[in-house]
Structure formats: structure tokens, C-alpha cells
Image (cartoon, rainbow, N blue to C red):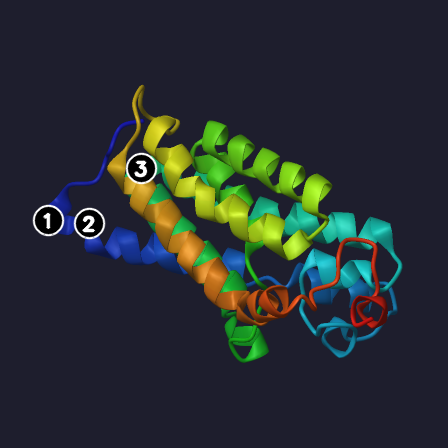
């Protein structure tokens, strides 16, 4: 993938990629879909989060799946569009997309936890890394039955995968992608601080288990 932008005049384009990615990433699909379905404000249900896991607590599996796909797709679309102008633009749009999802201006900067959007970004940026992260989530979730732990480990291993696997524009790994994956992992871990505390206390509900059951 060629880099079409010269460095001396690059910053306006980088800002445009960051802003475009942010606007795409800030679309709160979980909130929009549940309101369109007549379920009210998803932020008043369960954990109050706007992501697919909380949408699933409404009992509408289809809405949860749509939220998961759209939250991932918005990150992927931002990266793919910006990537037409080179890998640095793709990375900048990826930063914007995850920041938009985590801190959307429309919701007073209180957004989702970023797992689906992160996976969508990685799949568009370097699909082998994204696939490896998705498989990590599936394996941990299947074995340990903790959705949050699966998400945390999936993003934590992403920089290691990026170290060995090439992005779409090269035949070898790119240090920029390694650092990019590490930043995404830090942001997702920071957003999961309450889940981490519950995991350490043994109070985090397993997949398919209600919170009330987990307390006993």
C-alpha cells in the first residue's frame, strides 16, 4: 500500500483521518438499535454499557449480534477508507475510531468498552492479527466462560501477534502496528477496570450466568 502523502504537509490529512475515524467510531449503535426496537435507553439496563454484551441482556440476540457487527464494522470502515492514502493514515483513523467509541461526544464521552471496535480495526488493518485475536477470545471464552477475561486476553495478545504477523501492506511485521495494537490494548483494559476488579474478587459472572448467581 503506497504512502501518498509527503511528511511536510501530512498533518492536516492526519487530523482529517483522526476526525473521520472519531465520527464513525462515535456512532452508538447499541443505543440506536435498542431505541429503534422500542426497548428504551440501553444505558438504564444491566451494566449501563452501550455494547453488544449489555444489549444481549435485553433478551434480543439479533440486536446484540447486529450491535457487535456494526461496532466492529465502523472501526474497519474507518481504517479501510483512510488506508487508501497509506498505512499511516489507516493507523490514525484507527486511533480516531477507538477513541470515538470509548469517548463519544454525543454521550458526554461515556461510551462502550471497545472490544468489537478494536477487533474490527485489527481485521481491517491486518486480518491475520484480527483473526488471531478473535480466536483467542473464542478459546478463552469457551474454556473459562468469562467474556470480559476473553476480551482482555484477546487484546493483550494482539501486540504479540502483530510482532510476528504482517499487516496488509507488507510481507513482514511493522513496528507501527505493534505499538498501535499495544495502545488499543491499554485503552480497552482501562475501560474494563470494573470487570478486572470483579475478576480479582471472584465476582465476575460467567457467560450464561446471572450476576445474582455469581454472588453465591
Locate residue 160 relative to residue 115 in the image: left or right: left
Instruction: Give left or right: position of 33 versus 8.
Output: right
Tell me the CA gap for discs 3 and 2: 13 Å
Camera-near label (3 vs 2) is: 3
Going from N to C along the chain, the mark reached first, 3 or 1, is: 1
Could you say where residue 33 lies in the image, as x and y percent from the top left?
A: 77, 61
Circle 1 residues within 10 Å: few <14, some 14–19, many ≥20: few
Asked which secondary structure carries label 1, the reply is helix
Relative to 192, residue 97 above or below? above
Q: Position of residue 67 (x, y in %)?
A: 71, 53
Which quadrant holds residue 106? Answer: bottom right
Residue at 49 percent of width and 47 percent of height: 155
* Residue 77 seen in this snapshot: no
Q: Contact (CB < 8 A) between labels 2 and 1?
A: yes
- The residue under label 3 is 87
What SS does tag 3 mark?
Answer: helix
Q: Nearer the viewer, residue 89 or 198?
A: 198
Residue drawn at point x = 31 percent, y = 23 percent: 170
> Furthest-top residue in view?
171
Which of 123/90 is in front? 123
Q: Disc 3 vs disc 1: Cβ atoms closer than 8 Å?
A: no
Q: What residue is pinned by disc 2?
A: 10
Q: Dot 1 corresponds to which residue? A: 8
Horizontally, residue 70 falls left or right of residue 4, namely right
In the image, is residue 145 above or below residue 165?
below
Spot occupied by residue 136 in the image (x, y as percentages of width and height): 57, 37
Amino acid at each position: 500500500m503506497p504512502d501518498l502523502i509527503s511528511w511536510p504537509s501530512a498533518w492536516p490529512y492526519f487530523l482529517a483521518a483522526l476526525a473521520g475515524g472519531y465520527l464513525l467510531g462515535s456512532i452508538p449503535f447499541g443505543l440506536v438499535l435498542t431505541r429503534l426496537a422500542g426497548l428504551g435507553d440501553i444505558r438504564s439496563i444491566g451494566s449501563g454499557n452501550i455494547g453488544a454484551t449489555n444489549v444481549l441482556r435485553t433478551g434480543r440476540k439479533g440486536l446484540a449480534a447486529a450491535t457487535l457487527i456494526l461496532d466492529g464494522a465502523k472501526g474497519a470502515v474507518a481504517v479501510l477508507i483512510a488506508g487508501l492514502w497509506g498505512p499511516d493514515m489507516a493507523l490514525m483513523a484507527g486511533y480516531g475510531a477507538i477513541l470515538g467509541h470509548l469517548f463519544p461526544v454525543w454521550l458526554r464521552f461515556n461510551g462502550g468498552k471497545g472490544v468489537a471496535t478494536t477487533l474490527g480495526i485489527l481485521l481491517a488493518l491486518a486480518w491475520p492479527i484480527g483473526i488471531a485475536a478473535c480466536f483467542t477470545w473464542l478459546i478463552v471464552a469457551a474454556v473459562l466462560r468469562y467474556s470480559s477475561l476473553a476480551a482482555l486476553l484477546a487484546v493483550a495478545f494482539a501486540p504479540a501477534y502483530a510482532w510476528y504477523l504482517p499487516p496488509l501492506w507488507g510481507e513482514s511485521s511493522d513496528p507501527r502496528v505493534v505499538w498501535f495494537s499495544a495502545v488499543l490494548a491499554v485503552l480497552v483494559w482501562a475501560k474494563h477496570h470494573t470487570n478486572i476488579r470483579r475478576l480479582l474478587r471472584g465476582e465476575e459472572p460467567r457467560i450464561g450466568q446471572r450476576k445474582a448467581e455469581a454472588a453465591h
